[in-house]
Amino acid sequence: MNVELIPLLILALLLISAGGADVETAELVMEGDHEVTEHRGALIVGDATVTVPADAEVSGPIYVIGGDVRIQGTVAGDVTQLSGSLVAEEGAAIGGELLHISGTETLAEEATIAVRTTADLTPAEPSPLAAYTPLVLTTLVLSLVGGWLAEKRRSLLENVGRAARDHTLVSLTVGGLLFVTFLSVFVFMAFTLVLIPVSILGLLIGMLTTAYGVLAWGYLVGERLNTPRVGVATGLGVVAVVALTQLLGLIPFVGELITGVLLLTGLGAVVVTYFGLRPFEPVVLPE
């Protein structure tokens, strides 16, 4: 599941609850191509392609948080578009309110829509200074924290860094399993509404743990500088790692894949070393 969809999923669940619909009957479609001919309760569309055929009528409501929704038939209830693509073809009908917040929308002139509302929340194009300020501040904070840890608790970063470098496959496997498992748990908790705060807290802890892994990578890079000022070297190393991830992000797929491996390996190394409190010792099978 695309992590960026989680905030939209939580928002969709809150909107479903506020609208009086039963959250427990809501269905989340996250991948694949689907034809929906009947559906009870709310339908949330993520990274999937959903089509309501010309001869079908579904009750709705439908929430589009990603992917593609193509309406050829009738949706009796509301349609809310938070992201993704929505197409209402000739002959399509939406009996409730079509609320467009973000995403691309294509409506045929012959499509029948009872109520159409647009809430334009798209931010204005930021200036270069505003666009890069959050990244610069985040990098600065990570660099300072990394430098401080290297000076005060060097063994923490050393243990995590050694695990990431010397036991890359183990760390990557653990990091990948943690990512998939906890992401599923957080999404499940979001559906309960009551546990949404716990889900958000869990995501924040996951982000902080991943950032800890970045500090460890920065420590390893700082070691290459071969200077006794380990704090300064680690801070510069963290800056180099963040810059590398930004450059890799410019390369479609391959760059994103390498960045993901880097972050998941760091995440796994943090966990297998108990947040750096002890070195990772792989299990040795008896002969």
Image (cartoon, rainbow, N blue to C red):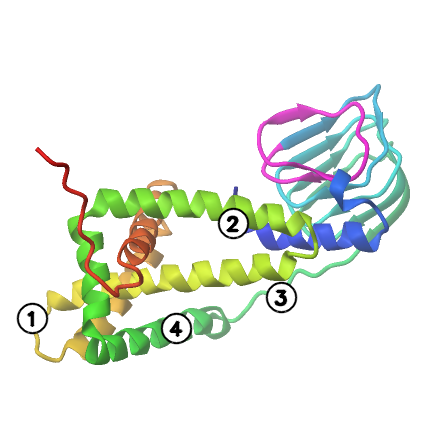
Density class for disc 2 (Cα within 10 Å; few <14, some 14-19, many ≥20) is few
Is 17 part of what is drawn in magenta? no
Q: Amino acid at mark 4?
A: Val
Label located before the other in sequence (1 or 3): 3
96 relative position to 104: left or right: right
Residue 282, x across and y down, in percent: 18, 46
Label located before the other in sequence (3 or 2): 2
The residue that mark 4 highlights is 136
- Identity of the residue drawn at 23% across and 76% down: 153
When asked about the image quadrant of residue 215, the answer is bottom left
Q: Is residue 256 visible?
A: no
Give the CA separation, mark 3 to mark 2: 24 Å
Of badges 2 and 4, nearer the viewer stands 2
- Identity of the residue drawn at 19% across and 47% down: 167
Element type at mark 1: loop
Residue contact at pointers 1 and 3, CB within 8 angstroms:
no
Q: Amino acid at mark 2?
A: Val
Of badges 4 and 3, nearer the viewer stands 4
Q: Amino acid at mark 3?
A: Ala
- The answer to whether 82 is drawn above or below residue 146 in the figure is above
Q: Residue furthest top?
A: 55
The dot on residue 105 is none
The residue that mark 2 highlights is 3
Element type at mark 4: helix
Give the CA separation, mark 1 to mark 4: 26 Å
Give the CA separation, mark 4 to mark 3: 20 Å
The dot on residue 226 is 1
The residue that mark 3 highlights is 124
Residue 36, x across and y down, in percent: 74, 25
Residue 12, x across and y down, in percent: 71, 50
